[in-house]
Amino acid sequence: MNIVVQKFGGTSVRNLECQRQVMQKVLRPYREGNKVIVVLSAMAGETNRLLELANQWSDSPDPAEMDSMVSTGEQISCALFTMLLKQQGVKARSLLGFQAPIKTDDCFGKARIRSIDDTRLKELLEEYDVLVMAGFQGCDDEMRITTLGRGGSDTSAVALAAAVKADVCEIYTDVPGVFTTDPNMCTDARKIDRVAYDEMLEMASMGAKVLQIRSVEFAKKYNVTVHVRSTFSDEPGTIVTQEDETMESVLVSGIAYDKDQAQITLVHVKDTPGISAQIFSPLAEKKILVDMIVQNPSKDGVTDMTFTVPRADVDQTIKTLEKLQYEIGYEQLTSNLNVSKVSIIGVGMRNHSGVASHAFQALADENINILMISTSEIKVTCLIDDKYTELAVRTLHKAFKLEEGQHVIETS
Amino acid sequence: MNIVVQKFGGTSVRNLECQRQVMQKVLRPYREGNKVIVVLSAMAGETNRLLELANQWSDSPDPAEMDSMVSTGEQISCALFTMLLKQQGVKARSLLGFQAPIKTDDCFGKARIRSIDDTRLKELLEEYDVLVMAGFQGCDDEMRITTLGRGGSDTSAVALAAAVKADVCEIYTDVPGVFTTDPNMCTDARKIDRVAYDEMLEMASMGAKVLQIRSVEFAKKYNVTVHVRSTFSDEPGTIVTQEDETMESVLVSGIAYDKDQAQITLVHVKDTPGISAQIFSPLAEKKILVDMIVQNPSKDGVTDMTFTVPRADVDQTIKTLEKLQYEIGYEQLTSNLNVSKVSIIGVGMRNHSGVASHAFQALADENINILMISTSEIKVTCLIDDKYTELAVRTLHKAFKLEEGQHVIETS
C-alpha cells in the first residue's frame, strides 16, 4: 500500500473555493493509486475567533476546556472537506484526534504525541481511499481532547506519515518552499531543493516559519521525507530529508535571522562556582528561553555575564534577576532591546574550516559590529545591532554566493 | 449521592450574560450539596450556521460528516460554560458524547441512544461536582460522532438522569412550564402543575414544542421525574411524572392543535382485503407519516378512504398514489390543505364517559364542523377547517373549564 500524507494550513482551506483547489491536490496522488491521508488545519481565522471568545468568558480560561473548544476548528474544516470528496465519489471519511487515535500527554495547549495506532489507521486505509485527519489535536489517556500548540498540524502530519510509513509527507504552504533566506529581505533569495533535517531545525529555531520545529524533530527521528511545497502551484518545493553527500558539499545552505531578541548583561558578577545556575535556573523556572550566553574571562574574581532572551520576556527577566541581586551578587544589570541574531546554517560546515571567519570578514567589510558570537556544529550566529539586520542578511547571502545555487565555496 | 440533571437550551446559553444566569441556576443545587449534571445545547443560531455552511459545500452533505460538524456547537458552549464555573472555583469539567460515553446506533442525524456508561459517570461525579455534558450527541461503536436529531438535548438530559438515577431532571426553557393550551392562542391558558407521561406524549406529538417526544418516552420508560421550568424565573414549572390519583380526577389536562395538516381522500376505492396495506405501505416506505385514517362503510363493494398527512408531504403523497391508481383501483383523489387537528388530552378520560360528546357539543354550539374524528384512550382528536382553529381551541378550553385549575368536570 503506497501512502501519501498531505497537510494543508488554514489559509488553504479558508473557504469553499480554496478547498476545491486543495481537492485537486489530493486527487492527484489518489488517481495515481495511492492512499492519501490529508491533514487539515482550521479554516483561517477560526482558531483566533475561538480564543477571543474564551478570553471574553474567562481571564484565565481552563486549558483543557480551551483545547476542547479550539479543536472544533479542525473538526469543521475536516467535515466540510470530506463532504466535497464524497460528492466526487471518493471513498473518504474524516478522522478526529481521539478517533485515530493520536494519543498525547495531558499538557493541554501544548501536548506531545505519545503514540499513534498504526494498526487502526491501516485498517481504515483498507476501507477508505482518503482519510481526512484533523491536525493539531489528539487525546490523552482519559479521552480528553488535547492540542499540540500553534503549528501543531505539521507535527500531526509528520507523525502520521511516520506511523503509517508513508512514502512522503507533503506540507503545503503559501510559499514555494524553503528559501536560502527571507525573500522579503533579500531579493536574491533562492528556493532550496534539498535541505537536511539538522539545517531545517536550525532554520526553524531561528524563526523560519515554514515548518514547526517539532515536526522537523519528528521527521528526523523517524526518517520521514518531508516535501514543503506551494498550495498554489504544481512546482516541486523543498525536500527535507537525511543529510547526503550533495548537501555536505555545500558550505552554507541558508541565512536566518531573528529580530525578536534582547541582550541582558549582569555587570561584575562574583565569579564563584555555581553562579551560572544561580542566574539561569530562576529564569528557566519562569519558562524564559535564554539563548546565547557569553561569560567574559574572570578578572579579580568578577566577570560580566551576557545573554539573550526573547524581547517579550525582558521585563520578567529583569524583575526576576533584580530580586536576586543580593543573592547572585552583581553590581549592575543592563539591557539592550535593539539587537538581532543573524545566522549562517549549513551541514557542510562540519567538514570545512574558515566558514565563520569568512562571515565575520564579510560583516566587518560592511562595518557591522558583532556584539556576541555563538557557534554550533552547523551554525554560526552573530548578535548585531538590529538596524543592520537586513544589511547583514544580504551581505552574508552574497558572501556565500547563495543566489547562485548550491555549490562549494573555497574559503581557505 | 444526590444528583440533579439540568438541561438548558440554545437561547439560554446564547451569550455570556445568559450563561451567567444559567450558572446561578446550576449553583443552587450545587450549593445545596447535590452533584449536578448540566446538559447544554449549542448557542442559539450556531447549529443553523453550521447546517448552512454544509449546504454550501454539498447538495447532499454526508450525514456522518454533518454530525461531526454540528456537534461542535455543543462542544463550544460546554467548554465556555465550564470555564465560567471553574472561575467560580467549582470542580467542573465538560463531557462530550464520546467521552461519557453515550453510545448510540449509527443513524447519523437521528441516532438513538443505546447505552450510557453509568459506572464511568459515577466515577466522574466522585471527582467533579458539576459535569457539563454536551447535549444532542453521542457516538456509535466505531467512535464516530452521532447526533440525536433536533431537540435531542432533552433526550440526552432524560437519558442521563435515568442512567445515574438522578432525583430530578430539570428542563429549562423560555416558557414557565407546560400549559393547558398555547397561551398565544388562548389568553386563559394556565400552567399545569403536574402532567402524566402519556398526556405529555400526546401533547408533544401534537406539536407542543416544550419537550421532545423521545425524551418523554425515555422518561416514561425509566420513570424519570421531569421538571419543565423557566430559565428566567425561580417559580416551579410543570412536573412530568407517573400518573397518579390527582391527575386521574381531572378529565382533560390540555388542548393541543396542529395546523400543519392536510386531508387526502381516495374516492370509490374497491373494498377488497389488503386494500389498506396497498395504500399505506407505499407511503410508509416514503417515510410519510399518515395520522388519522377513516374508512367509510363499504357500499356496493366500494368505499372512500380519507386520511391526514403533514402538509409538507402532500405533493409526494399525491404523486405516490397517482402512480398506483390502476393498481389500487380508486376513481378519484381529492386533497384539502385547509384543515387542522384539535385534540383534548387527559388521562382522566380512561375512567369517565361523555368527554368526547361534551367536546363535540361545544364545537357544534360554535358551528364548527368536524371533518374527521379519531380517539385514543386519553385523547380525542377532531379534524376541522383550519380557519376555526383558534376558536375551537378557545371553545374547548372553556368547555372543560381549564382556566379554573385542575378539577373534575361533571359531564354525564
Image: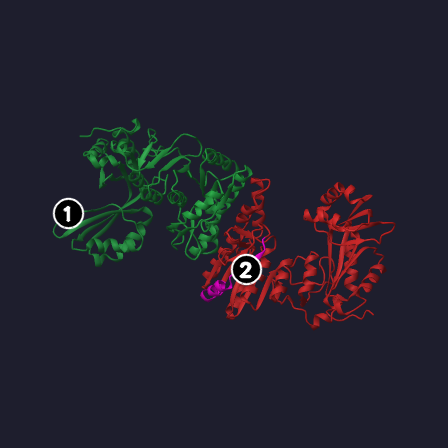
Chain colours: A red, B green
**Please, what secondary structure does the residue beneath circle 2 have?**
strand
Specify the amino acid type for callout 2: Ser
The percent position of residue A256, horizontal first and vertical second, equals: 73, 59
Specify the amino acid type for callout 1: Pro
- Near-viewer residue (A107 or A168): A107
The percent position of residue A5, horizontal first and vertical second, equals: 55, 64
Q: Chain of mark 2?
A: A
**Please, what secondary structure does the residue beneath circle 1 have?**
loop
> Residue A114: within the magenta?
yes
Where residue A18 sits, quadrant-wise, is bottom right
Q: Is residue A272 visible?
A: yes
Relative vertical location of residue A344 with respect to residue B101 in this rendering, above or below: below
Q: Residues within 10 Å of mark 2 (few under 14, many from 20)?
A: some
**How many numbered circles does the render carry?**
2
Q: Residues within 10 Å of mark 1 (few under 14, many from 20)?
A: few
Lateral position of residue B161 relative to residue A274, left or right: left
Q: Chain of mark 1?
A: B
Lateral position of residue A104 relative to residue A264, left or right: left
Relative vertical location of residue A72 with respect to residue A116 in this rendering, above or below: above
Residue at 75% in and 41% down: A323
Give the residue number, with chain letter if any, for mark 1: B297
Residue range in magenta is: A111-130
Check if mark 2's residue and mark 1's residue have beta carbons within 8 Å: no
Give the residue number, with chain letter if any, for mark 2: A115
Q: Residue furthest right?
A: A300
Task: Please state which of the two labelled residues, at mark 2 or mark 1, is closer to the viewer.
Answer: 2
